[in-house]
Image (tube, rainbow, N blue to C red):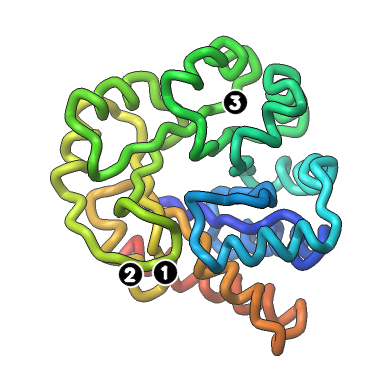
């Protein structure tokens, strides 16, 4: 069974909604929740997620909110933190990993933390049983892939194309998937541009998909009630989970 990871922006539109949505997604086929940490300059994210980040910050998101939501959901659905390194670094990253572990968070996705820099924290990740998710891009050489995935944990995040999330660009990933699997037995999940229309194609040859903009797009629809947003997200998760496992 291929896995589905769902990204949601913590605190948008509010914390109670984030908690309710995460738990509902966990009951509708989502295997892991990626709690996004709102940030003022989300360079790897497209305009949809960027807008949700901005709205959450405008509504008063504080880092403690991430901890509070994690405490409520992580024992019920596998939970990862996705964020840029600056907010993590400001809170003493080594200590923060211990906090994450105490909350049952299983991994960190940090797109602007280079592999070489992440190695400095390898012991801290290990002793707290927190996975540092490795990124591979289509532009990486075989040598680079081998280096990055040699100690990959939990899953390898394959960026479906060079660019930002949400634009849905198509790209043949078969060669890079083969390269990754040559050097690692860690599951490969593909992200960027995965939605109900592209999920089946994107899932070919990999072990799972990561979906963000498709969920956040629903949350940005002001004509929907909060209940409708949750219902639409859970229905989307069921559709995508079905398609990637056809």
Q: Nearer the viewer, residue 7 or 115?
A: 115
* Residue beneath the point at 60% across and 76% down: 218
Which mark is first along the chain, 3 or 2?
Answer: 3
**Pointers 2 and 1 in contact (C-beta within 8 Å):** yes
Residue drawn where x is 71% and y is 42% of the image: 74
Please give left or right for residue 145 compared with residue 16 in the image: left
Query: Could one spot residue 137 in this view of the protein?
Result: yes
**Residue at the limit of the structure toward the left, as seen here:** 175
With 9 as the anchor, is 4 left or right in this view? left
**Residue assigned mark 3:** 130
Spot occupied by residue 220 in the image (x, y as percentages of width and height): 65, 75
Q: Name the residue rendered at 62%, 14% in the picture.
A: 124
Q: Residue 99: x percent and y percent? A: 77, 26
Mark 1 and mark 3 lie on one chain; the one further toward the N terminus is 3
Q: Quadrant of the C terminus?
A: bottom left
Residue 18, position as x, y percentages in the image: 75, 60
Q: Is residue 168 left or right of residue 13?
A: left
Residue position marked by numbered label 2 in the rendering? 198
Q: Secondary structure at mark 1?
A: loop
Q: Are marks 2 and 3 in contact (CB under 8 Å)?
A: no
Disc ID at residue 195? 1
Name, please, the residue furthest toward the bottom. Answer: 223
Residue 71 makes an appearance in the image: no
Which secondary structure lies at badge 3? loop
Q: How many marks?
A: 3
Residue 27 drawn above or below residue 125: below
The numbered dot on residue 187 is none
> Badge 3, how many Cα within 10 Å: few under 14, some, many 20+?
many
Q: Is 7 rendered above or below residue 68? A: below
């Amino acid at each position: 069974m291929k896995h589905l990871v769902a990204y949601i922006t913590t605190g948008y539109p509010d914390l109670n909604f984030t908690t309710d949505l995460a738990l509902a997604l966990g009951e509708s086929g989502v295997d892991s929740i990626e709690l996004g940490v709102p940030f003022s300059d989300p360079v790897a994210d497209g305009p949809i997620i960027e807008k949700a980040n901005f709205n959450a910050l405008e509504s008063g998101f504080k880092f403690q909110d991430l901890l509070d939501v994690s405490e409520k959901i992580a024992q019920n659905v596998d939970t990862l933190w996705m964020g840029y390194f600056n907010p993590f670094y400001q809170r003493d990253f080594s200590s923060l990993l211990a906090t994450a572990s105490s909350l049952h968070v299983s991994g960190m996705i940090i797109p602007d933390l280079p592999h070489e820099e992440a190695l400095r924290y390898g012991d801290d990740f290990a002793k707290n049983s927190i996975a540092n998710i490795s990124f591979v891009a289509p532009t990486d050489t075989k040598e680079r892939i081998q280096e990055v995935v040699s100690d990959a944990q939990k899953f390898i995040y394959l960026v479906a194309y060079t660019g930002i999330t949400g634009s849905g660009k198509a790209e043949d990933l078969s060669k890079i998937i083969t390269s990754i699997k040559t050097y690692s037995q860690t599951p490969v999940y593909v992200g960027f541009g995965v939605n109900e229309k592209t999920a089946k194609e994107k899932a070919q040859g990999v072990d799972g998909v990561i979906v963000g903009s498709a969920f956040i797009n629903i949350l940005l629809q002001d004509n929907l009630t909060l209940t409708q947003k949750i219902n639409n997200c859970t229905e989307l998760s069921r559709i995508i989970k079905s398609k990637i496992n056809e």
